[in-house]
Amino acid sequence: MTQWDWLVKPEKPYSWTFARNVVIKAILLFIGVNVVYALVQPLPWLSQVTLYGTAFPARSRLPYADNPDVAYNVSLNPIEGLFASHILSESSTDDKYQIFIVGDSSVWGWLLDDTQTFDACINGRGVVDATGKPIKAYNLGYPSTNALKDLMIISEALQYQPDLIIWLVTLESLYDVDQTTHPILQNNAEIVLSLIDDYSISLNTEDLSSSNSILDRTLWGQRRELADWLRHQLFGIPWTHTHIDHVNPRFFRPAMENLPASEQVTNRAYLTPENLKDSLAIDVIQAGVQLTHEQDVTLLIVNEPILVSSGINSDKRYNELHPRWIYDRYRGLMLTEAEGNNWRYLDLWNAVPAEAFTDFPLHYNAEWTCNIAEEFLEALIASNLIVPLE
Amino acid sequence: MTLIHIVLLSTLSIPFMTLIPPQQRSQGLTILSIAVVAWLFAEDTLNNSDLLLLSITIGLVVLTWWIIKSPESNHTGFQQHIEIALPLLLIVLFGLFLGSVSIQFAITYVVIGVLTVGFATPKTAISNVNSRQLALFAVLGIIAILVILKAPPLAEISGFLVGWDASSLATASPLLWLGFSYVSFRLIAVLLDYRAGRLPKEGYALSDLVTYTLFFPAYTAGPIDRAQRFIPELQSAKSFDAAIVVEGFSRIAVGIFKKFVIADTLAIIALSPVLVEQTTTTTGMWLLVYLYALQIYFDFSGYSDVAIGIGRLYGIKLPENFDRPYLQRNIQQFWQRWHITLSTWFRLYFFTPFSRTMIRSQYDIPQWFIVLAAQMSTMILIGMWHGITLNFVLWGAWHGLGLFLHKMLADNTKSWYRKVQANTWSRRLMAGASVLATFHFVALGWVFFALPDFSMSLEVFGKLFVVSN
């Protein structure tokens, strides 16, 4: 008896009626499952189902990968899924002072191991808060320069009761035309639209409104997200036994120090000194200030370091991203907003020497990541929020 | 075959089987097989070397057909030569139209084609003995091509020589002769059966032999059928009934799920050179080995299911290739259920004749040595069929040794075994332990199969058996 006897030796011979009925039932089942799925929309709660923290150790960074198969990591879009596998999900708040660090790829640790990021530096420093509780820092960076994305992450992170949030921002993360275009925002449109509405953020929400068609709500429409969720669970196996969540290439193209002569931002020729303020979504940062204030969470906003070149055309540009005039105006705007709205604000724009940068004007090496983490701690010590251990 | 190939070819079976009269389906399958194999060769674009390899493949079939053809046979084959030549000519024209085939190649191709068609002339009076010698030379020639393809250094040289496209002349690339491992075994089987007198006296029609060799569902990865079974199946005109549709599509669906869902998912996290280097724990390494064992089973058996299912849709019942191999109680049973057609082929064309030769030898060879030599050499050859590298040889030797030890153990523990079988609990315990032991033996053997070199295999064994967390 072979394993296929059930198929090739049926009790009753197959008929065309049988074949037709199978096809019809399959089609009806497919349609039915998709309709039920579209109505129930299980993806948000399914994204919270995870093997991390039980079968596999939790991850110390939000899941993200350009090349999943070698990084053993997947870029998940549902915000619930991002947090489900994070070490934050298994933390308890009672016995420690929790610091969440939010920002872009420089916070996430591009080209760094998860033992070389800001949170790892702070956790290795051995400091306590003013009441003597040990400090525990968590990495909530996500590799995208987008302030609205950061705001969304902050709003989700508040349920884990941070004591302090350090939010790294930069000019690149504030262009208003880009705020709603990232897939992670479009895939969490409801949350983002709610934040925009609650805090009266003035942004064009067209990209968010049109992102949820009927097909997008079905099982078929969300098959990519479901596949990513499943792969993310499977990657727990190599993650557990290799501790690899990011591919660090041996060689990379260093950030440019000899720069083009242009004094415009690439693809943003519309920016002028007069319209710069209106082109930046600084109200997103203000929304973050309000949001954290409502939850009685301290927020430290940091203007993150950028590469300050001394190469060709460095008199016109700081780096490949930032012409000098635009970046200087941006800094001025930020200082004005910070003073006017009583932000806890730290400007570290030129705190990292050019030679410490890696592949991008916002990414620097492990040594300087820890040096910048020291700057955070110095600022917090100066505010009497934390004290160093002797 | 990709998912697109599978879906299109499955769907095509419906108009094929409903519109083409049963009596003409074998010709239809000949033309379809040539066209589909050309499509599989082409991948992105059909170029000179793809066409050349396809033509050489068909040329080998023509040669085989001519060798086995009886001079008195009425398989003059002219019409069949047209059935083969016409699709090839259309493919060449298509390639010319796309610009991927050069005009020089097309002209050379036509000239060679005309010469090949010359085989349509009746076989001159050549004695059966000479034909049998020709068959042997043909077998040796096919084996020589197989060796060249499978031995990496030789494959690189041959790739350079055959790289007609100007862009590829600058670098030597391994010759990628799609499906030749299976083509070679089908043709060798026919030639050896001819020598042994196991074929019909009149031989086979050329188009039938082409279809047998190039049958598209089984072209790239088997099953390896025998002409004596396949060709009568091809000739028997079947009505397109519900059983064909249900069995065919069901089998394809199962195969797609096994290969594209389970196997392709497991491939991400199964044993691989990269993961071997990155994994430091014993538990992790064992997981990789287990996952690879599952991955290779689902991949290969899934592909066989698809092939059998598509064959069924076109009215051909291909032989089974897998039957719950990991649930078997010893290595001998495993090899009766893993890649069944390959192990059957080797048993028929190597193991049995080789053993018989040793048994009948004038030298008094001990029985145990005959068993050891036959099993080791068979399994090593199976390993080398996959690739002529040390790791494939070791994989074959691993299984050869396992088969030998199983035979010795089984022969010497019969009375003890009967006692165990007499009691229900000991029988069940024995069955469970045997299945586990066999699975682990096979899984450890895959370490050689999956990795490119011996030192890496040793590294794996080191991590498996030296506890490290």
Image: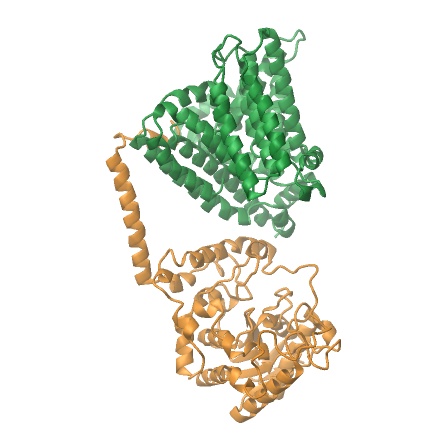
In the image, residue B118 above or below residue A161? above
Q: Quadrant of residue B312?
A: top left
Residue B108 percent across, percent down from the top left: 63, 30
The total number of labels drawn is 0
| B99 is higher (above) or lower (below) than A328 | above
x, y (%) of residue B450?
A: 60, 40
Tell me the orange chain: A
Question: In x, y percent, where is residue B402?
Answer: 58, 28
Q: Please state which of residues B82 and B396 is positioned toward the viewer in this rendering.
A: B82
Left or right: where A232 falls relative to B394 = left
Q: Residue furthest left?
A: A17
Name the residue located 62 percent from the left edge and 74 percent from the top edge.
Answer: A122
Left or right of A388? Residue B290 is left
Chain coloured green in this rendering: B
Q: Residue furthest right?
A: A311
Q: Does residue B90 sit above or below A78 in this rendering?
A: above
Q: Is residue A382 above or below residue B282?
A: below
- Confirm whether residue A317 shows in the render: yes
Q: Nearer the viewer, residue A116 or B68?
A: B68
- Front in this rendered view, residue A209 or A241: A209
| One can see residue B224 in this view | no
Q: Is residue B209 left or right of residue B375?
A: left
**Residue B368 lies in what quarter of the image?**
top right
User: From the viewer's perspective, is A14 left or right of A130?
Assistant: left
Q: How is the image coloured?
A: by chain
Q: Residue A330 appears at what percent x and percent y?
A: 59, 85
